[in-house]
Amino acid sequence: MTPPSKKALVPFVSVANMMAFVNLTGIEKVLADLAQVIEADFRRWPEFDKTPRVASHSNVGVIELMPTADASFYGFKYVNGHPTNTRAGLQTVTAFGLLADVQTGYPVLLTEMTILTALRTAAMSALAAKHLAPKGARTMAMIGNGAQSEFQCLAFKAVCGIDTVRLYDIDPAATAKCARNLAGSGLTVVTCKTAEAAVEGAEIITTCTADKQYATILTDNMVGPGVHINAIGGDCPGKTELHRDILLRSSIFVEYPPQTRVEGEIQQLDADHPVIELWEVFLGKAKGRTDSRQITLFDSVGFAIEDFSALCYINAHIRETGLFEDLDMLADPDDPRDLFGMVQRAK
């Protein structure tokens, strides 16, 4: 890309503009496009700087920075996870992100990422399932019907061809909300009164619960042979959703092992328990699903390259829509060495 000029303003995508962009483009197209961009970036995995996210934990949640870079761009996301926020009418997860030009260090995009994180998380889930789920899978159980659930269901429809979702949440109001939001989506929506009922007949099981605790959303007897599990709720130390015995029966696929072993379902296992990295599956360096009775598990915690992909996607498309605001973030003295003089002249 052309480096920004000294007078450049930084495009900022607000929540209102992100919603407008998604509605203008079409949510299923955005999800499918994001899946393609993420897969393309995972296929060049060695080109990226990689590090586990930098996390600050408290007894009520976590605040994290998720950085990565390739030769052209540096990106990071600020994100929190506070499950008790919903009691005060606040979001469990909020986020914003920045993309910068490696050649100059100048930021080229600042954007909300609360909505964008939900979109990229759903796109990543569906992308993994495209490679791991049983061929011809059409039914997904969606256990946990909170803020992520509709995005997940629509991503699986757009990327994997799912046509039926079976919904369950411990809060019936959440299930009713999800069913209402999915009305008219083209999906057949079945509301269930128990998690056991939700998984009946489902080839794919997605778990997406928020409580920061060692939980057992799926017990071992609920998971039969041949299913694909998309476990996205366990994403920090001390937070899991699956019984350990399920892990021992599954082929486990992860984004970045040094992060997942600390934060994912596999924190329950020995540190040397074998896992398969998804980027190697995408490149054909490792096998995904190998037979019809295999249980595949995507132990998803979210990794910075996925956010980088989402930032680059928005950066590539937002200007043509006009759905952004210019921010004066970059000091630009006539003489780069005279920042003080610029301040003085502002009098």
Image (spheres, rainbow, N blue to C red):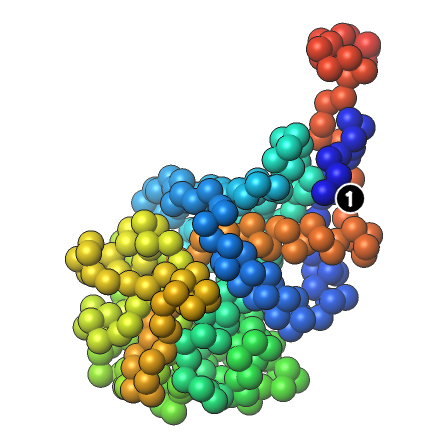
Q: Quadrant of residue 317?
A: bottom right
The residue at 28%/69% (across/down) is 242
Left or right: where 332 falls relative to 54: right
The answer to whether residue 200 of the structure is visible from this angle is yes
- Within 10 angstroms of label 1, few (less than 14), some, or many (20 or more) residues? some
The answer to whether residue 212 of the structure is visible from this angle is no
Give percent across and percent down for residue 35: 57, 66
Where is the C terminus found, in terms of image quarters?
Answer: top right
Q: Quadrant of residue 151?
A: bottom right
Mark 1 highlights which residue?
A: 325
Amino acid on which the number 1 mark rests in the picture: Glu
Task: Please state which of residues 161 and 211 is positioned toward the viewer in this rendering.
Answer: 161
Left or right: where 343 falls relative to 231: right
| Number of dots carrying numbers | 1
Q: Quadrant of residue 19?
A: bottom right
Instruction: Specify the farthest residue to the front.
Output: 285
Disc 1 element: strand
Instruction: Specify the farthest residue to the bottom.
Output: 201
Q: Is residue 20 above or below residue 207?
A: above
Left or right: where 157 falls relative to 22: left
Where is the N terminus found, in terms of image quarters?
Answer: top right
Give percent across and percent down for residue 263: 32, 53
Give percent across and percent down for residue 109: 68, 43
The residue at 37%/73% (across/down) is 288
Give percent across and percent down for residue 214: 25, 61
Q: Is residue 211 above or below residue 54?
A: below
The residue at 29%/72% (across/down) is 251
Left or right: where 347 falls relative to 287: right
The residue at 82%/9% (across/down) is 345
